[in-house]
Amino acid sequence: MQIGIISEPSDKRVALVPDVIKQLIETSNSVLVESGAGLRSYISDQQFEKGGAKVTTREEVLESADMLLSINKLSGDLYDGLKSDTVVISSFQPFNDDSVSKMLSSSNVTAFSMDMIPRITLAQSMDVLSSMASIAGYRAVLEAANNLPRYFPMLTTAAGTIPPAKVLVLGAGVAGLQAIATAKRLGGVVEAFDTRLAAKEEVESLGAKFVMVEGATDDKDAGGYAVEQTEEYRQQQQVLIQEKATKADVIITTAQLRGKPAPLLIKTETVKSMKPGSVIIDLASSTGGNCELTKDNETIVAHEVTIIGNSDLAQQVPMHASQLYAKNIFNFLKVLISEDGTLNLDMENEILGSSCIAHQGHAHYAN
């Protein structure tokens, strides 16, 4: 199997790293890498070559690869240069992007989306969503600290005592839990909210206080996403969040609904009630944001509160993000590629069946 990767203009990460390439070559594959693909992840062409890859032009990668790997979906014009039976593996996010189905239907590729892999025990080692969310949660706290006009930890000095920053984390999934752990390491006092009662033990184990609203709809099969709640619950939730927000120095929001706009958790009136200089990091900005005032990929100041909308903070840590993504890909390929080097397109397999979103030009994922 000839596997190819190309550089991605809008992303600092790269889909494979040299150590993983070595493992792929040991299992009878060959790897083509576009020259310069790893530079923003601090991986040189020479490092790729030492790993066993052939560094070449983008044109050769697209024309020769039997399988093409990427972090983000390819632009539509690139499909014209692929062989008709090429397998493309990426994070297509088909639930959030209506253009994916049309784009894949106009080509003749077989496409697997890493974000569609079921979040089951058997597939944990392939879970790109968790890998990237963990980095995003960590980075969110650093962004907050960088923008907060005060210390995070409590400090006792000759000039007096400075109290610790108060942090509110909305959503205690992978990103939220990493945000809690990071904020605690920096010395913050952390509270966390989640609709899932099961998150309580995890939150408290990290030293944070769990904030709970009774009567939540809990869906354990939601794949790590939030689920829609009743109007009565949302009203109770809003009251509690506003109460906690007025006391917080930092709010980090992580709640998203698969295929739907992110739930609105922080309204404009809540922002108005927050302390001047407070910071909101909205990790759900790409799907509308959890804060009413969030603008995706922008940092704004509204009512003396800094609001940072960024759903892609993982690429701000490109070295380790690339390493984790590559390992997720490798573990997925162990299922997709048989020991003899042939493709295993067994759609009865739960992992392959769930993640395959197109086969030879026919898109077939379910909304």
Image (cartoon, rainbow, N blue to C red):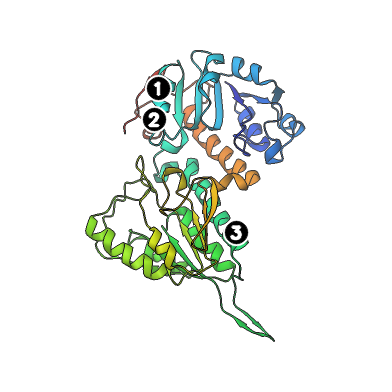
SS state under label 3: helix
Q: Position of residue 166 (x, y in %)?
A: 50, 71
Residue type of the residue flagged with mark 3: Leu
SS state under label 2: loop
Residue type of the residue flagged with mark 2: Asp
Quarter of the image with the N terminus is top right
Q: Position of residue 17 (x, y in %)?
A: 65, 36
Quarter of the image with the C terminus is top left
> In the rendered image of this protein, does residue 1 appear above or below residue 331?
above
> In the rendered image of this protein, does residue 318 appear above or below residue 66?
below
Task: In this rendered view, identify the residue nearer to me: 54 or 191.
Answer: 191
Can residue 338 be seen? no
Residue type of the residue flagged with mark 1: Lys
Task: In this rendered view, identify the residue nearer to me: 88 or 350.
Answer: 88
Label 2: how many Cα within 10 Å (few below 14, some 14–19, many 20+): few
- Name the residue: 60% across, 37% down: 11
> In the rendered image of this protein, does residue 283 appear above or below residue 87?
below
Residue beneath label 3, please? 142
Residue beneath label 2, please? 98
- Name the residue: 61% across, 30% down: 24
Q: Position of residue 254 (x, y in %)?
A: 44, 53
Tell me the distance, in whole angstroms, between the alpha carbons under discs 2 and 3. 33 Å
Residue beneath label 1, please? 102
Q: Quadrant of residue 104?
A: top left
- Name the residue: 43% across, 35% down: 93
SS state under label 1: helix
Can residue 233 be seen? yes
Task: In this rendered view, identify the residue nearer to me: 360 or 138.
Answer: 138
